[in-house]
Amino acid sequence: METNVHQTLYPLVRDYMNALGTSRTTVVALKSYIEAVRRLACDDDQFRSSLLALNTVIRETEPKVVPLVHLIEEFEDELQASREKDLAAAKSVVFKILQNKLQRFEADTLKLSEQCTSLIEPNDFIIAHSPTAYIRDGFVRAHNELKRPFKVLVLKQDFLRTKDLVNAFDAHKIDYLLIPEHNLSHYLGQTDKLFISAVTITAEGQAITGPGTANVVSICHAYKVPVFLFAESLKFSHRLLPEQRIHKKECDTMESDCRFQMTSFSHDFVGLNMVDHLYTEKGETAKSSGAGPLSP
């Protein structure tokens, strides 16, 4: 039963991460957790064990959703300190703890978006690769609030993420150019910056990113286009790259009349030595190590 639950939830989490990004996935997961607790019907003595079982699945996702894992582990520590045995009282404590975690993460994400906004300068031509919500919102705020003229080179990759970004640019009349990711070389002499985000940053200084990011960062680094990486502090991990559970998929693929086996990975990883500027919600931070203040 437990294996079936894992097999169901892991792809679901990956789909959310691909479509929404890690930050919005963390927010959606916390809201879903709160709603699940609200609906949970069980005996008083089964409540905590039910939560711990769900927490185990969250910790073992492939790849790890590090900010969510941090928040869930903090939640467990605070839950252990409570002594309520009545189901209604225990639920009330859980709601309060999780709402505080949600508000904290949303505040950090908003501050990170403000950092992104401040780095968009007049007449910039910025490459956007698989950007998360706070990078998208940074572009919107720079355009609407700061009235800064700039242009974005959108690299088409994942359909849903590209659609989300392009729809936002169209709605706010932000100047952009959409190209296939593999055509980036034609514009490197014109671009000023590359904005990327990360799923997590590991202890040895590897940023786990969306697929294709490593290639884009490499070519920008070679052409001396400054690479800006944005990540909330909660995305820093003390664990190493192999422990982040990047999902490997092997499947038979049919094209025309040819069948072959395809191996793919859910995410890339980029060394911080390839990144020029690393920003958290607190501002620019040293990129000599991926070690952060917390540790799943």
Image: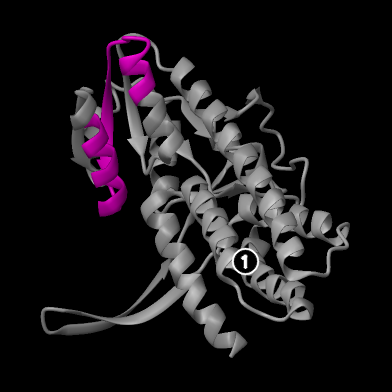
- Magenta-span inclusion, residue 167: yes
Task: Identify the image quadrant of the N terminus.
Answer: bottom right
Identify which residue is drawn at 45% across, 63% down.
Answer: 14
Residue 8 visible in rendering: yes
Residue in the picture at 66% in, 65% down: 59
Q: Quadrant of residue 61?
A: bottom right
The C terminus: image quadrant: bottom right
Mark 1 element type: helix
The answer to which of 46 and 214 lies nearer the viewer is 46
Residue 248 place in picture, x, y as percent = 48, 71
Residue at the image position 52 percent from the left and 33 percent from the top:
229
Number of on-image labels = 1
Does the magenta run of residues contain 252? no
Dot 1 amino acid type: Ile
State the scheme by which the image is colored.
Answer: one colour
- Taking the image as shown, residue 181 lies to the left or right of residue 209, namely left
Residue 239 appears in view: no
Q: Mark 1, residues whose alpha carbon is within 10 Å: few (<14), some, or many (≥20)?
A: many
Q: Which residues are magenta?
A: 140-169
Determine whether 137 is above or below 183 in the image: above
158 vs 36, left or right, is left
Q: Position of residue 101 (x, y in %)?
A: 66, 46
Say above or below: 251 vs 78. below
Q: Is residue 169 above or below residue 5?
A: above
Disc 1 designates what residue? 58
